[in-house]
Image (tube, rainbow, N blue to C red):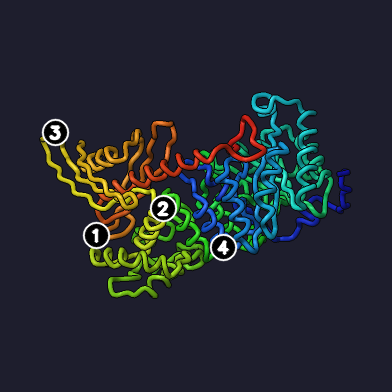
Amino acid sequence: MPRRAAAPQAASPKAGASASHRVRIFDTTLRDGEQSPGCSMDRFQKVQMALQLEKLGVDIIEAGFPIASNDEFEAVRDVAKALKKPIVAGLSRSSRGDIDRCWDAVRHARRPRIHTFIATSDIHLKYKLRMTRQELLKEVAASVRHARKLCRDIEWSAEDATRSDWDFLAEAVKIAIGEGATTINLPDTVGYIVPSEFRRFWEHIFEKVPAFDDVIFSAHCHNDLGLAVANSLVAVESGVRQVECTVNGIGERAGNASLEEVVMALHTRKDALPFVTGVRTREIYPSSRLLTSMTGVPVQPNKAVVGKNAFAHEAGIHQHGVLSKAITYEIMTPKSVGRPSNSLVLGKHSGRAGLRSRYEQLGFKMTKEEVTSIYPRFTDLADKKKEVYDEDLIALLQEERAGQGDSSYHLEFLQVTSSTGTQPAATAMVRLREGETVHSEVGRGNGPVDAAVDAILRITGVKCRLTDFSVNSVTRGRDALAEANLMVEFGDGLQLAGHGASPDTVEAGAKAFLSAVNKHRLTQRLKKNGPPGRGKRKNGGRPKGI
C-alpha cells in the first residue's frame, strides 16, 4: 500500500481537527488492567465486564492480547461479538503473525480496531529489540502497512515513548501516519515523566509532526510516581483527544491512569478543563464494584471517587458543614458517580423480584435462573444478619459465579476447634464437594484458618504456600461480613489471588483459599489445550504493557 497523503491542516492538533472538546475514553481494563497481579478474568467475566463498560459509555474497549493464548483469543472474540456500540480493539506486537491473530479476534466486532505497538526508546532498542533505529523505522512501516490492509481503524503505539529521543520518535510517528495509522498513542510506559515535562513533550511532537485532519493522538500513562492522572490531564490540555485508562486504576506495577479520576476531573472542573466525554458518570461506581467482585482485589479505602471513604466525613467540623450544605466539603455528590447509600436495602422478607431489582441497580444483569439459584443463600444470610447491605449482595454473587463449573471444589461443611497452650492449637473438619463426590478430611494448624487450609490441602493434594493473607470487614456491626483476600504460590511457580466472604472469619479464609485452588485447577486445564494458534513466536506471551 502506498504512503497515504496527509490532509493539510492550518495548525497543530490542538487547534485543528482535534480542537473539538470531545475526549475519547479508551478503556484497557480487560488488557493492561488484567495484567495486574491477581486481576485475571476468565472469558465469562471479560464479557460481563465489557458489557458494563459499554453501559458506562466508553468509546473504545481494548479486549485483550489475542496472541497470548487460545483462551485469550476466544475471550477477545467473545467480547467483539457481544458489544454493539464501542470500538473493540485487540493488542498486537509488530510481527505479521501477531497482527493476523489480532484481526482474527476483533474482526467480529461492529467497529474493530487493530492496536499494534513497538518500543522506540534507545533502552528498549539496545536491550530488548536489539535493533538499530533504521531497522525500527522499517518495522514500523511494515507493521502498520500490513495492519491497514486488514482493518481501516489502526492504532499505533510507541512503547516507552517518553524516554525516547523526541526527534526520532517524531520520525516514527510520521511513518506510522503515512502508512495508515488513524490513532497515534505515545505512552509513558514506566510512569517516568512529570506533568511540566509532558506538556513540553506534546508541544515538541505537534511541532515536528505535520498536522493531519483524520488522526487522533492518545496518551497512555502509568502511575509509578503517582502522576498518571495528572499527566493524562496535561496531555488533554496540550491537544490529545484520547486518554487510555482503567477502572480502579488497575494495571502493571502501580497501575494505569484511573478512568474514574480522569472522567470526574473533566466533569467536575469544566471551568479549568473545558472538555467532555461520553461516559455516563452514574455507572462509574457500579463498574468499580463489578470489577472488584470479579477479581477479589479491593479498592483502597481512600481511593478517589470509588473508595469506601471517598464520601465519608468523620471530623465534627466536616460533618457540620456537610449537613448544612454538602458542597462545603463535597465537590461532587455520591449520586453523580452512582454510589448507593449505605442504608438497609434488603432483608429476609424480600422477594426474588426485589433481589433482582437491587442487583440491576448495582450494575449486575441477572437472569431468572441466577436469581432463583442465589435466593436461598440470600435468605440464609438474611436470617443470620439483622441487615443485608449492597456489599453482602456483591459478595454472594461473586461466590455464586465462582462456584459455577462441575470440576470446582465447593465448601459444604467446616467445623473448627481451637485452644491456647496446646499443640496443635487448632483442628478443622472440612467437607468439600467435587461434582457428585464428597471429600472429608481433618486438618491441624497453628490457628483455625491454618487448620482449615491444611484440611483442604489434604483433600486436593495441591502443593503450594500462602504468601499473603488479609481479612477486612466489608459491612457494619457485630454481624459484619468478613472478606478474606490472599495470595497463593503454587508448586509450578504460578501465583494466584483468592477471595472469600462470610459472616464467619474462618469460613471466609477457607473460601478464599479454595477459590485460589479452583483458579489453579482451571489454569491447569487450559494448559492442556496446547499452545496458541498460528502466529506464535518463541518469545510469545503477554507484552509487559505499553
Of circles 2 and 3, the one toward us is: 2
**Residue matched to label 3:** 423
Q: Mark 4 is on which residue type?
A: Leu
In the image, which disc is placed on residue 56?
A: 4
Of marks 4 and 2, which one's residue comes earlier in the chain? 4
The furthest residue to the front: 436
Tell me the number on the disc at residue 397.
Answer: none
Task: Pick whichever of labels 4 and 3 is earlier in the sequence.
Answer: 4
Residue 479: mark in rendering: 1
Quarter of the image where one finds residue 441: top left
User: CA gap, disc 4 to disc 1?
Assistant: 34 Å
Mark 2 or mark 1, whichever is nearer to me: 2
Quickly name the residue at label 2: 405
Q: Is residue 346 left or right of residue 153?
A: left
Does dot 1 land on a helix, a strand or a loop? loop
Identify which residue is drawn at 59% across, 55% down.
79
Query: Label 4 vs label 3: CA separation?
Result: 54 Å
- Residue at disc 2, secondary structure: loop
Mark 3 vs mark 1, foreground winner is 3
The N terminus: image quadrant:
top right
x, y percentage for residue 74? 58, 49
Task: Give amino acid for label 2.
Answer: Gly
Give the CA distance from mark 2 to mark 1: 30 Å
Q: Residues within 10 Å of mark 2 (few under 14, many from 20)?
A: few
Q: Is residue 483 visible?
A: no
